[in-house]
Amino acid sequence: MVYCIVILEAVVAVELLINFLVGLVSFLSPCVLPLVPAYISYMGGRMTYSVSAQVDIVAEAGGTAKLRRTTAMRLSTFIHGLAFVAGFTFVFVALTVLATAFIQQIGSTRAVEGIIGRVGGMLIIFLGFHFMGAFQPLFKWLRKQETVIKNPIFSLVMALFFSVLIVWGFTGAIIPFGDDRIPLWTIAISGVLLAILWTFFVAGGGFTTPARFWNKAMNTIEVTLYADTRRQVAAAGTSGLGGSALLGVVFAAGWSPCIGPTLGAAMTLAAQQDNIGTAAILITAYSLGLGIPFLITALMLDSAQGILRRLNKHMHTIKLVSGAVLVLIGVLVASGQLQQLSARLSSNLGGFAYTFDECAFAVQQGEIGGDQFNRCIAGEDYNGLVEEHRARNQTAPTPMPEATPEASAPSGVLSANISSIRDTARQLPDVGLAVGQIAPNFTATTTTGDSLSLNDLRGKTVLLNFWFTSCEPCQKEMPAFQNAYVNHSDSFTVLAINRSESAETVSAFGAELSLTFPLVLDPDGRLQAQFNIIGYPTTYLINPDGVIIAYHLGPLSDADIAQLIHTATS
């Protein structure tokens, strides 16, 4: 049967889309648009140079010559556009991979991810306001309010405000003391930063000469934010693909400070991933969003200038809308809502795909009619549709043949009879993930705080399930697990290993479904990696000797579980 399976990190799909859209926003920024005419000049110069080398002399009145831009020339220009995009993509990906690798060296823990989300989210909000051009008018207004910036109370209020942001950003709490869940090292870091902040205010004259202090601070921020490090792009008709790629590298190096608001937002989203490959994919999505308009421009050189002139007329609106989107993304990242939103969207999409696959399979098997498919995916009672189809076709249900371990197994399950498992075990290493091998041992903590080892369960059949709360197919099989756990508790147990969610979230889920079997926590994804999990739900069935006797990718029904238990005990 076809099942809805959440492959890899399904929630990353939303971040991919966001990074792609942020890349598009970067192209429309006041930093990049002025580059485009120079880019057009470069690409147009390449095309003109190539065409002039192969010019067709056409006899016309007055003896003029005609330049024809052929499809081959346009393709060559497009390829050079690809080289340009590859150049700046390489720089952006390299920066992100280095940042993610550094984070992994610190320790890919929930605390680190929380700090990245909160601090990075605040940075995105700051960059969003910068993108909207909010700071220059604000600073101009403050400079006119001499009575405000000359008052030491203003400095005190701002110092307290920044102190709260630092403590919350690094600990997740306004008052971090007395909460055992907050690591001491995060409190220590925030303490060091607070000391630096208050030293800066005191030594810089924030309380003694506040007007001079704030004017100097605003000047420094303006120089930092609005300094122009860009270089002009020169057309070079004779340069090869290496020249176009180098041009992309120069663009990344020279324009990165200018497109910092959007690039910073994209890199923050990417750095929240504790997998270097995923981070690289996310920043590549940003580069594609930024690069595709360049590629389209290369293909449409003749009309690109007019489009850019029209966009320039609406630059102020584009800046405001783009900045507002960045602020919204920053709020979602800082509050931790972005991951939850991604999970909810993935769950909804996964649930629809699951229903779609089930209904399509039912039509294929003749259980319902093709004209009932839309009603099926709309959520109409499945059994009612089956009965309606049977009555309409006046057919009686065909009894299912009795399943045997040797002849039948649940769809997607790699299983074998006991003798073949023993034969396989003789040829395979002692410990591994294949059917017939001994499952690797692990020790983990349950939602109740108990430590549990897989080897401690020798003597019982163990159903090892990998899942997460917002995965709808995972949710559907939990009642079946509970029934099997209750009915066969003397010789059978279930270990449901959750993917990287908090104990509170997992406990609330278990209480809602009245689950009594152990719910195991895997906050850093160690067990997911140990068992090479590529999709959810994933289930291993392990016999009393610790040998894997079945593997299944997708949800299991009561009948599937009964068949697996029968296989294990026969």
Image (spheres, grey):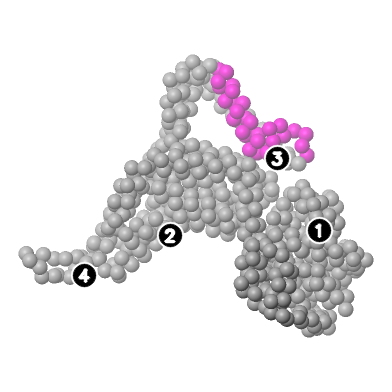
Closer to the camera: disc 3 or disc 2?
2
Cα separation between marks 3 and 2: 40 Å
Q: Is residue 134 left or right of residue 70?
A: right
Q: Decide: marks 4, 2 in contact (CB < 8 A)?
A: no
Mark found first going from the N terminus, 3 or 1: 3
x%, y% of residue 364? 64, 77
Mark found first going from the N terminus, 2 or 1: 2
Res 116 visible:
no
Residue 14: image quadrant is: bottom right
> Local crowd at mark 2 within 10 Å, few (<14), some, or many (≥20)?
many
> Disc 2 on helix, strand or loop?
helix
**Front residue of this view, candidates 423 and 506:** 506
Mark found first going from the N terminus, 3 or 4: 4
**Front residue of this view, candidates 462 and 421:** 462
Amino acid type, label 1: Thr
> Local crowd at mark 3 within 10 Å, few (<14), some, or many (≥20)?
few
Residue 443 - label: 1
- The residue beneath circle 3 is 185
Q: Which residues are magenta?
A: 152-180
- The residue beneath circle 2 is 86
Instruction: From this view, report whether residue 191 is shown above or below residue 263.
Output: above
Mark found first going from the N terminus, 4 or 2: 4
